[in-house]
Every structure is written in C-alpha cells, then in structure tokens.
Image: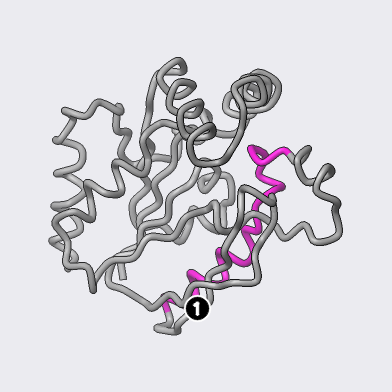
Amino acid sequence: MLIIGIAGGTGSGKTTVVNQIIHQLPTNEVCVISQDSYYKATDDLSYDERTKINFDHPRAIDFELLVAQLKSLKKGKVVEQPVYSFVTHNRTSDTIKTHPRKVILVEGILIFNSEELRNLFDIKVFVHAETDERLIRRLRRDIAERGRDIDEVLNRYQDTLKPMHQQFIEPTKNYADIIIPNDRYNTVAIDIVRTVINERL
C-alpha cells in the first residue's frame, strides 16, 4: 500500500491535484481520504459556540482517529470514515465504509502538523498557490457550497485563516518531498507523482 499526503493552504487546489493524480489510475486501486472528515465531534457545544471554532488550528482535527484508521487500512481492514457537516459544524451520524486500496491519498490543510500522521506517508506533496488566488477560490466555494455570506468569509479569512496559514500551514512545506506550484499547466510534478505510483503498483 502506498499512502500519499497532499497538503496546502485553503483554496490552493489540493482537490484538483488529487483528481489529476487519480484520473489515470484504476478506480478499484485508489481511495481518497479528506482531513475535513476528521474534524472533532462537537455535540457538547451549541450551534453558536460551534461557529466560533477555529477550524484552521490543528487542535480542531481528530488526528488520533485518522492515524488509527490509516493503520487499520494498512493492515487490510475496512474502516468507517466519519462524515462532517460544514452546515451544522459537527459530525453527522453517517459514516463511509472505506476499503483498503493499493493507493490511499490523504488530503487536507493540516495533515503535516501531526508527526505520527506524517510518518505514515510514503510521499508528501505540498500544493502552493498565491494568497490572493486562494482567497478568491475560498470566497467562491464558501458562498456557493457552504451557505456563507461574503462578510463572514472575509472576516474569517482576516481573523483566522490568514494567521493560521502563516503559523501552521506554510511552515509544513518543509516536510514535503514534492512542492507543486498550483498552475493548471504544471503537469510535470503530477506526472512525477503518477510515475512513482505506477512503479509501486
């Protein structure tokens, strides 16, 4: 089994990179695990309290569960991945049955912050994009997909996203084996990752 970690700031294009990598792989040999599924359950908090959670801080992530489930997958076991709702800011009662695959892609902004998780990755990829580009993408996504208004997104960006990116995300670039500048024409880095995967497969 080959486990690949794909990190980068919010709106950097991690999902695009993931899709480009899996595009030419057989669907039954690859699965994608998103860090977003592993935000901690917040049943003990009211909705208003949940909206104030700093989702860009490593403390918000249940790294313990993510590490445990990856280790189970490595041992050939099926796991029940949690499902997180950004509308309610909490885990739902649903889970996703996830089977072991030859290639597992783990993507998320904070995945390189846990040493134990980092050590499980055979390849560490960091997707880099300019700050203004990331802000524009974040605005579009949060308004279209997560029901946020523009002021809410901009305030969160200014107060939380930007300082957290500088403190916790940008420095983890140093752990990466490959840094992909997010340019849609940058096929070389994607091809390198794909080549490594194909060799392992």
- Residue drawn 69% across and 56% down? 90
Q: Secondary structure at mark 1?
A: strand
Q: Quadrant of the C terminus?
A: bottom left
Q: Is residue 72 above or below residue 60?
A: below
The scheme the figure's colours follow is: one colour
Q: Is residue 71 above or below residue 178?
A: below
Q: Residue at x 37, y 40 (%)?
A: 14
Question: x, y percentage for residue 85?
Answer: 61, 55
| Residue 3: % across, % down | 36, 61
Question: Taken as a whole, is the magenta stretch helix, strand or loop?
Answer: helix
Please tell me which residue lies in front, 148 or 45: 148
Q: Quadrant of residue 155?
A: top right
Give the number of marks: 1
Does 29 lie within the magenta span? no
Q: Residues within 10 Å of mark 1 (few under 14, many from 20)?
A: some
Location of residue 185 in the rendering, given as x and y in whole percent from the top left corner? 16, 28
Magenta stretch contains residue 71: yes
Instruction: In this rendered view, identify the residue nearer to me: 163 or 150.
Output: 150
Residue at x 69% of width, y 48% of height: 60
Q: Which residues are magenta?
A: 54-74
- Residue 30 place in picture, x, y as percent: 28, 66
Image height check: is 181 above or below 46? above
Q: Which residue is mark 1?
A: 79
